[in-house]
Image (cartoon, rainbow, N blue to C red):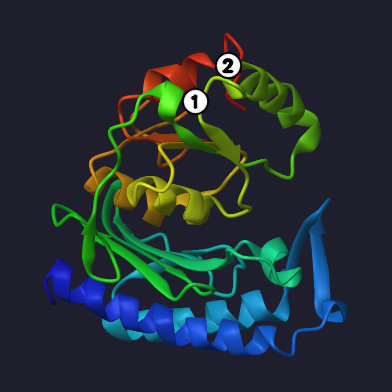
């Protein structure tokens, strides 16, 4: 097997190739072919086709690895080594022709994240990391910021579970709006994490997200020198549905902004 650095480079090539499909299909995309998975949660033929393309190419890189995918185009294998695939994170953005949207790919062995690659289609940006190797944007190393909470530029994404999350986002906005430099919603969990890794955001939070939304981004933030926990402050996040990502310096401030005590599920 290739080493992690070489394998990451191959994954970047695959992500960019499938990104071309997403970009070209967006030019002829019709909202008539959108399906509703849940309230305000959508999927289209583009998500499913992109996932099949990614599975085929990644299977060629590591024939013994299994898959954990958002659109269930391949059955879970029960293996320890798995590719974790979100073929189109930011589907609603894609449908509306609004940036950002991306492909998110991670390689995980048990609980151990080995590779994370996120390709943002609109800006042609490829974020990549491998365990112990640092984090990169288009092959240039990136690092988190060193800003304090009063200077911080924060991402607060909002999940589809409006009824459950509305009290939490209200509390976060009340605690942070006017205290931090600014707050943004971008519509893609994977990109929110990448923005923390690249120093575009100083912190980011969202709940009711899945392992394919955040696995690649978690590794990117960690390799860029940041901190990742769930809303309760736990460092082991691979089975959670709520994430805080930060430059470390503002992490406690973000967690304290949550309702107390935070009810996790």
Q: Which residue is at the far top?
A: 260
Q: Can you see residue 160?
A: yes
Describe residue 252's horizontal placement relative to residue 139 as left or right. Answer: right
Is 101 situated above or below 178? below
Q: Earlier along the polypeptide chain: callout 1 or callout 2?
A: 1
Is 259 situated above or below 56? above
Q: Nearer the viewer, residue 42 or 189?
A: 189
The C terminus sits in image quarter? top right
| Image location of residue 132, percent across then percent down | 13, 52
Q: Nearer the viewer, residue 137 or 118?
A: 137
Q: Secondary structure at mark 2?
A: loop
| Image location of residue 64, percent across then percent down | 28, 75
Q: Which residue is mark 2?
A: 262
Q: Secondary structure at mark 1?
A: loop
Describe residue 244's horizontal placement relative to residue 64 as left or right. Answer: right
Is 153 situated above or below 42? above
Q: Can you see residue 232?
A: no
Q: Dot 2 surroundings within 10 Å: few (below 14), some, or many (20 or more)?
A: few
Residue at 56% x, 80% y is: 50
Q: Which residue is mark 1?
A: 231
In this figure, what is the number of numbered marks? 2
Is 149 situated above or below 112? above
| Image location of residue 188, percent across then percent down | 58, 55
As drawn, the label of residue 45 is none
Residue at 45% x, 79% y is: 55
The N terminus sits in image quarter? bottom left
Gap in angstroms between the C-alphas marked 1 and 2: 7 Å
Q: Quadrant of residue 72?
A: bottom right
Q: Nearer the viewer, residue 147 or 167?
A: 147
Describe residue 265's horizontal placement relative to residue 55 as left or right. Answer: right
Quick check: marks 1 and 2 in contact, CB under 8 Å? yes
Residue at 52% x, 67% y is: 102
């Amino acid at each position: 097997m290739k080493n992690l650095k070489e394998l990451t480079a191959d994954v970047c090539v695959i992500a960019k190739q499938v990104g071309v499909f997403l970009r070209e299909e967006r030019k002829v995309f019709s909202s008539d072919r959108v399906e509703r998975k849940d309230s305000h949660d959508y999927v289209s033929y583009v998500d499913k086709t992109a996932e099949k393309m990614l599975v085929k190419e990644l299977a060629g890189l590591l024939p013994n690895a299994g898959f954990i995918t958002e659109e269930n185009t391949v059955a879970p294998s029960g293996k320890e080594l798995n590719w974790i695939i979100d073929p189109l994170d930011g589907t609603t953005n894609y449908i509306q022709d609004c940036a950002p949207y991306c492909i998110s790919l991670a390689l995980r062995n048990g609980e151990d994240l080995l590779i994370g690659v996120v390709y943002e289609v609109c800006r042609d940006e490829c974020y990549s990391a491998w365990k112990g190797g640092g984090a990169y944007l288009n092959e240039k190393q990136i690092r988190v910021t060193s800003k304090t909470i009063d200077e911080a530029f924060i991402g607060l994404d909002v999940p589809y579970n409006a009824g459950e999350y509305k009290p939490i986002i209200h509390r976060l906005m009340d605690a942070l709006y006017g205290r931090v430099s600014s707050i943004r919603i971008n519509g893609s969990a994977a990109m929110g994490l990448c923005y923390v890794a690249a120093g575009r955001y100083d912190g980011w939070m969202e709940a009711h997200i899945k392992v394919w939304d955040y696995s690649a981004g978690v590794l990117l933030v960690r390799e860029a020198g940041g901190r990742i926990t769930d809303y309760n402050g736990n460092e082991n996040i691979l089975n959670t549905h709520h994430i805080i990502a930060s430059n470390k310096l503002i992490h406690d401030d973000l967690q304290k902004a949550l309702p107390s005590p935070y009810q996790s599920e």
